[in-house]
Image (spheres, rainbow, N blue to C red):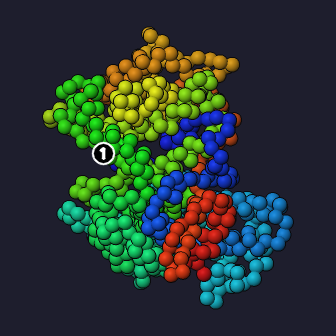
């Protein structure tokens, strides 16, 4: 299975989550929606269970959240070398503006500021394209010149005009730094990407530099380039290391100080040890130390509070070497984690009862225990847009030898779900009130169970016949593998075993997921595809394969059908029991294909059911979706934590509040957590 170390709520996942369930009013009185601008919706999330943590755990979380927010500017600078100066200038204009705040120009500046805050820089967080300001260069220049010089982030001896000469093309000229990360084949990916992890070097130079550095015989290699910026000094390539005393020293030193305070409240020795190792790594910049830290971190499965803080994921580097700074502080949701533990503990029962040829069953199977967590703060590359699941560490040899942590951030998925109530999606696409009510009630839990079964058991189930090449299915391997894991989950979602295990309380609950799955696979996921294009992405192909196959093979019994109401197409499921049987039959066949390495049969299934889009249905879905006002991208503001101290400076409690809005939070972070700005 492909390691997806970051489950991102974009494309498919956001879809399944944001399209979850709808009622006219929200499920509780909490106000999830904070702001809406451009293609963005900003939400807030709850931190259920925080109040029940011990004072010690709360104090630990408090210092870790401070360390998290403190790294914000590191990411801003990694994203672009003029980002921090530009942010400061625009924030100064925004907060000090004395003209008409309802003018078109000022409102356009506000929108732009909200966009760059959201992206941690001048480029869209997802498309990587530079934002286009809707205010004029003249307005901007006048506004800057009307600011007192001491409000401007000028370098020693620099005039306002000199600063403007640098930042104006960055903001206004579409030809300057058009893309943060360029992945277009055949171009110099370093020179055409404006990301600030490289400066003054070409792609060929970077590749030569690392090729010379790498020891290919090393079985435990370090993550080369993870914490450095590559540049040239006197014509020679050098790595500037992110560490205390190195690049980003002011921010990293403060993070180290806060980690030191957090360490005093560690839950146990294992946790204290990995916090100490992280401090050592930030102090030395040594990537061997980072690996030691990663091992200690991966092996600590006892602590309830957990966090990441550092240069982790490499999607922001066109060559996938340097990590973008991020932090997520969280604690285990014991009740929800119980769900994945129960599933894992019963892995053998599921394997033994799987509707596949007994020759392809694993005699001994071990489930993966994914933990469900509650996020307490999102920061750096995880803020405001955030993943809903993480699987770390990234180094393959560490994963193999020391294990990894796979987590689902359930208070975030819950916020997506709640905020989508009332956005009109289900009213538009779900066939009737009865089905909508079932989805309202059971889709959140069955969606989560589907993910658990897919991840904890589905991928790990079954075995290859002796001598079969694991890569026999070639280019269709990942689609068929996702198909297999999804079918395993779908089949068992309807099994009475889940009720017996206490994971569901209603034998009809699975129908909510079945309906959503068929609707998504046959129709609604097409909203992500441009007219005339094929389905490309493996998960989308797998969903289409399953849904189209079941539709066709159930047609003689009329199991699932398209019906037309008021000129609109709907999916109608007439026989859920038979639909489950069809899922079982397809699982039987897909497992055979995988176990025997039957490339030809696999290819035929993918080509027949997974790729080609019916242009008529596609056009209809796009048309109906366009009338719904749903923001394609979502992100979050954080709650605010306030420590309560006694007379001796000891923390006696930490309170949490949810009343800070988007603009005040961004301005506060810029004011109070900006060690890298002037
Ligand atoms: Zn999968």
Residue placed furthest toward the top: 556
Q: Secondary structure at mark 1?
A: loop
Residue at the front extreme, as displayed: 647
| Image-based side of 402 in relation to 242, left or right | left
Could you tell me residue 456's position as x and y percent? Answer: 33, 41
**Which residue appears farthest toward the right when viewing the image?**
100
Expressed as whole percent of the image width and height from the top left, the position of residue 134 reads: 73, 59
Mark 1 is surrounded, within 10 Å at the Cα level, by few (under 14), some (14 to 19) or many (20 or more) other residues, namely: many
Nearer to me, 396 or 367? 367
Q: In the rendered image, which quarter contains the C terminus? A: bottom right
Which residue is drawn at the image coordinates 51% and 71% (left, top)? 652
Dividing the picture into quadrants, the one containing residue 488 is top left
- Rendered view: 610 above or below 123: above
Q: How many marks?
A: 1
The quadrant of the picture occupied by the N terminus is: top left
Please state the horizontal and vertical placement of residue 509, each as a whole percent of the image: 47, 28
x, y (%) of residue 500? 35, 30
Name of the residue lying farthest toward the left: 466
The residue drawn where x is 78% and y is 68% is 139
Q: Is residue 115 visible?
A: yes
Pick whichever, 412 or 53, lies toward us.
53
Cβ of disc 1 within 8 Å of ligand 1?
A: no
Side of 283 where 326 appears, left or right: right
Residue 294 seen in this snapshot? no
297 relative to 638 in the view: left or right: left
Report which residue position mark 1 lands on. 368
Q: With respect to residue 406, does 150 lie above or below? A: below
Q: Is residue 396 left or right of residue 62?
A: left
Residue occupying image coordinates x 77% and y 60% = 107
Residue drawn where x is 28% and y is 60% of the image:
299
């Amino acid at each position: 299975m492909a390691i997806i170390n970051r489950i991102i709520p974009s494309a498919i996942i956001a879809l399944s989550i944001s399209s979850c369930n709808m009622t006219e009013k929200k499920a509780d009185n909490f106000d999830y929606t904070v702001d809406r601008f451009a293609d963005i919706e900003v939400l807030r999330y709850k931190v259920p269970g925080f109040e029940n943590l011990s004072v010690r755990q709360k104090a630990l979380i408090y210092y870790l959240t401070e360390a998290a927010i403190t790294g914000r500017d590191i990411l801003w600078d990694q994203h672009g070398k003029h980002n921090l100066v530009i942010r400061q200038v625009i924030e100064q204009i925004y907060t000090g503006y004395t003209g008409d705040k309802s003018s078109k120009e000022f409102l356009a500046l506000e929108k732009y500021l909200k966009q760059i805050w959201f992206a941690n820089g001048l480029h869209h967080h997802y498309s990587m394209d530079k934002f286009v300001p809707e205010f004029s260069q003249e307005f901007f220049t006048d506004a800057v010149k009307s600011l007192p010089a001491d409000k401007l982030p000028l370098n020693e001896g620099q005039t306002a005009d000199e600063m403007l000469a640098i930042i104006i093309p960055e903001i206004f000229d579409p030809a300057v730094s058009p893309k943060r990360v360029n992945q277009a084949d055949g171009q110099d990916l370093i020179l055409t990407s404006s990301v600030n992890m490289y400066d003054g070097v070409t792609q060929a130079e970077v590749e030569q530099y690392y090729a010379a550095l790498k020891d290919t015989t090393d079985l435990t290699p370090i993550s080369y380039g993870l914490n450095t910026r590559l540049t040239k000094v006197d014509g020679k390539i050098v790595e500037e290391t992110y560490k205390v005393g190195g690049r980003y020293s002011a921010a990293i030193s403060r993070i180290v100080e806060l980690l030191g305070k957090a360490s005093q409240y560690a839950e146990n020795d294992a946790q204290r040890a990995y916090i100490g190792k992280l401090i050592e790594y930030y102090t030395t910049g040594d990537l061997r130390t980072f690996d030691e830290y990663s091992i200690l971190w991966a092996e600590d499965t006892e602590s309830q509070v957990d966090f990441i803080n550092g240069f982790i994921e490499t999607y922001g580097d066109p060559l996938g070497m340097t990590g973008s700074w991020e932090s997520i502080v969280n604690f285990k949701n014991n009740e929800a984690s119980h769900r994945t533990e129960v599933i894992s503990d019963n892995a053998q029962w599921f394997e033994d009862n799987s509707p596949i040829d007994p020759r392809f069953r694993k005699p001994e199977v071990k489930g993966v225990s994914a933990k469900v967590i509650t996020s307490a703060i999102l920061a750096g590359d995880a803020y405001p847009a955030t993943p809903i699941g993480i699987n770390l560490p990234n180094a393959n040899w560490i994963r193999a030898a020391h294990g990894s942590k796979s987590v689902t951030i359930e208070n975030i998925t819950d916020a997506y779900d709640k905020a989508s109530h009332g956005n009109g999606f289900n009213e538009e696409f779900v066939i009737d009130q009865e089905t909508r009510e079932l989805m309202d009630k059971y889709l959140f839990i069955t969606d989560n169970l589907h993910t658990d079964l897919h991840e904890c058991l589905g991928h790990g189930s079954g075995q290859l016949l002796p001598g079969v090449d694991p890569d026999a299915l070639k280019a269709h391997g990942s689609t068929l593998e996702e198909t297999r894991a999804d079918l395993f989950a779908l089949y068992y979602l309807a099994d009475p075993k889940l009720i017996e295990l206490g994971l569901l309380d209603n034998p009809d609950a699975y129908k909510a997921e079945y309906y959503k799955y068929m609707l998504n696979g046959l129709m609604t996921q097409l909203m992500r595809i441009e007219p005339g294009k094929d389905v490309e992405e493996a998960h989308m192909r797998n969903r289409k394969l399953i849904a189209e196959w079941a539709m066709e093979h159930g047609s003689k019994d009329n199991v699932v059908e398209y019906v037309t109401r008021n000129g609109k197409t709907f999916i109608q499921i007439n026989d859920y029991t038979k639909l489950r049987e069809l899922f079982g039959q397809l699982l039987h066949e897909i497992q055979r294909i995988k176990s025997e390495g039957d490339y030809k049969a696999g290819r035929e299934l993918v080509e027949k059911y997974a790729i080609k889009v019916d242009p008529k249905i596609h056009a209809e879905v796009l048309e109906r979706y366009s009338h719904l006002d749903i923001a394609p991208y979502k992100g979050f503001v954080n709650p605010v934590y306030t420590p309560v101290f006694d007379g001796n400076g000891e923390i006696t409690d930490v309170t949490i509040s949810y009343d800070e809005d988007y603009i005040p939070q961004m301005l506060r972070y810029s004011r109070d957590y900006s060690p890298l700005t002037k």
